[in-house]
Amino acid sequence: MAHAVTLIRSAALSDVAEYAYAATTPADARLIFLAGACPLNEDGTTAAVGDYAGQAAQAVTNMQTALAAAGASPQDVISTRVLVASARREDLVTAWKVVRDSFGEHDVPSTLMGVTVLGYQDQLVEIEAVAAVLDS
């Protein structure tokens, strides 16, 4: 299946970042805007309380489920924003590694942010995403 997303890299920017700096999609692509994927279990409880990596993994799973429901896959994601409830860089990096690794070679443009609090009890991680697909 052809993907609508083209990742853009620039030799004029640092190669330290573990993601593409930009992405584009053709005008006829259908955009999919996902609500923030939270680390919630099916029964609504927060998964992996106190565990940044565990919550990132559950948020990724929930994001993938939402993508599939919209007819998309992780390779169709054009950008993400990863929110982590912490002021510690180590916690942000822990969550980021799980999210980054879930995309494999599709190093989608992303923003990683530390925030003071997220919406659910004991929530530490949330992933916002936008995807683009070509309808056949």
Image (tube, grey):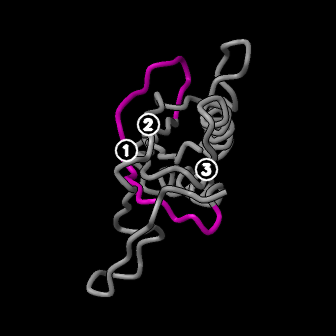
Which element is circle 2 on?
strand
Indicate the amino acid at tag 1. Answer: Gly
> Which residue sits at x=69%, y=38%?
61
| Residue 85: image tag | 2
Q: Quadrant of the N terminus?
A: bottom right
Span of residues in magenta: 104-124
Real-space CA distance between mark 2 and mark 1, rounded to the nearest whole angstrom: 6 Å
Which element is circle 1 on?
strand
Indicate the amino acid at tag 2. Answer: Ala
**Label 2 or label 1, whichever comes before in sequence order:** 2
As drawn, is 18 to the left or to the right of 102?
left
As drawn, is 79 to the left or to the right of 13?
right
Real-space CA distance between mark 1 and mark 3, rounded to the nearest whole angstrom: 23 Å
User: From the viewer's perspective, is the residue at label 1 or at label 3 nearer?
Assistant: 3
The answer to which of 84 and 101 lies nearer the viewer is: 101
> What residue is pinned by disc 3?
74
Residue 123 within the segment the image draws in magenta: yes
> Which residue sits at x=69%, y=27%?
47
The answer to which of 42 and 120 lies nearer the viewer is: 42
> What residue is pinned by disc 1?
114
